[in-house]
Amino acid sequence: MNRILEIIKDSKLSFEQRVVALAKEAENSINPLNISDSIKAYMEEGIICDLFEGNAPYKPRYILVDFEKFMEEGCKFLELRKPENIWEATHNLLILYKHIPSVTTMPVYIGNIDYLLEAFVENEEESYMAIKLFLNHIDKTITDSFCHGNIGPRETRAGRLILKAIRELDNPTPNLTIKYDQELTSNNFALDAVETSLLRSKPSFANHEKFTKDLKGDYGIASCYNGLKVGGGAYTLVRGRLGRLAKKAKNIEDFLNNILKDFVNKMSSLMDERIRFLVEESNYFESHFLVKEGFINRDNFTGMFGIVGLAECVNTLYKLENKEYIFAKDEEANNLGELIIQKLEGYLKEHKNKYCVFSDGHYLLHAQVGLDTDSGESPGCRIPVGEEPELVEHLIQSAPFHEYFPSGIGDIFTFEETAKLNLDYVLDIIKGSFNSGMRYFSFYADDCDVVRVTGYLVKKSEIAKLEKGEAVLRDTTVLGMGARNNMKAFDRRKREIE
């Protein structure tokens, strides 16, 4: 009751943010899931975390609607017919977005928006007006920058207009990714995306060839940088803190052969129970119009097995062995880091869940970006902030880990503002990183107001308002302030242009 009253009285929350927080309190007042005491102990220790999905899952965490089907057929439930012009196209999409649930209550994926709108671009001046209003409407109504759109890989007129509007608007929402493929993406379109990202921290670049192969065709990038199947998504994302887990081990061998295996089994069991309740008891997949009209299919959903703190895990294990090897600094530590992920992947493949059809019954590894309250544990497999090596060395160190995380992993690089004068240099870096096996590449210039925190975007100016006790439009601003203070997310090494 005290917590409910705190939410009601919190002047820093908007009305909508209070409604969401109160709903979450109601959900968490019950405990319908069958969770063992040993799993609860891991959760109480902070090793396993359900990432605020709630005690009674009644909708998938992430949904990637088949928007192409929607644009082609319209929607019976929403009484929308197939659009015939740019205004109807953007209007219909905005209506549908209001009805797509997620862990945030707002859509985390809004489609390959350039492809969705390209057929309606006739008069470019009018189309630009429609697209700019469309993007600004999203920012002001989907007040959560985990909302994510895609463009590419092929250049389109709509794609160029989207990038132009993003540069002009300077909004954190929606997040954006360009699916990049050297064989499909024109150099001019890629350079346009590079320039936009240096100015507005988006789009990030996704290795289109790699995602297409690993996710068996049509995929989307949702939320922070989550690769998932279009027409499906993720039932759940549960994460484990490897840094804390390492403290339970006697030595490296004990961690690899005993502690890690037990952890994978426990976290997989928790995911099994969350998915079981969602599928078998919540009735979501029997009742929601997205399912009934074929915009999503349960067979295209999977579970995301998230981890953070690989760097701290490696460093802790070497301390147990009285060795001074450091992650990202020493080859031995990097090799151990990859061995840990290999072992984790192996244990995970021994586990099967009957509701993860497209991923062959397996959960997909995800390098989770962390929480705003995290301290002393780095996102996913990233190098801790403040310990980053030279850029080329950083890319070489990071690339091998990207192979193991089909549902998302990413690195973020801050460039000096002089990078805006040498776009080809930045694009060459991206090409080289993808050729080396990297899956996802994010960057921005150090003078941006919109900045990438761990995977989502916030405005520095909004954080300044929040610090003065003012209410802010976007709930991710609160997360961004915490990540800045606790995770040093704004202190990344600045990369100079040679």
Image (cartoon, grey):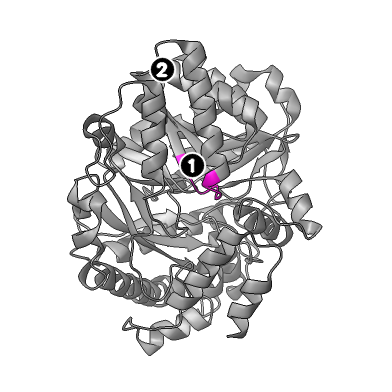
- Residue 207 in percent (x, y) is at 42, 33
Specify the amino acid type for callout 1. Answer: Ala
The residue furthest right is 468
- Residue 422 in percent (x, y) is at 67, 18
- Residue 134 in percent (x, y) is at 49, 31
Magenta span contains residue 142: yes
Please give the label number shown on residue 399: 1
Specify the amino acid type for callout 2. Answer: Thr
When asked about the image quadrant of residue 236, the answer is: bottom left
When asked about the image quadrant of residue 341, the answer is: bottom left
Looking at the image, which residue is at 45% across and 57% down? Answer: 105
Please give the label number shown on residue 156: 2
Name the residue nearer the viewer: 46 or 31.
31
Q: Quadrant of the C terminus?
A: top right
Q: Earlier in the sequence, mark 1 or mark 2?
A: 2
Measured Cα–Cα span from mark 1 to mark 2 = 30 Å
Question: Residue 369 vs residue 283: left or right?
Answer: right
Q: Would residue 300 be visible to someone looking at this image?
A: no
The answer to whether residue 477 is above or below residue 269 is: above
The answer to whether residue 196 is above or below residue 282 is: above
Q: Secondary structure at mark 2?
A: loop
Please give the label number shown on residue 37: none
Q: Quadrant of the N terminus?
A: bottom right
Name the residue nearer the viewer: 440 or 390.
440
Q: Secondary structure at mark 1?
A: helix
Magenta span contains residue 299: no
Question: Residue 435 vs residue 243: left or right?
Answer: left
Q: Which residues are magenta?
A: 141-148
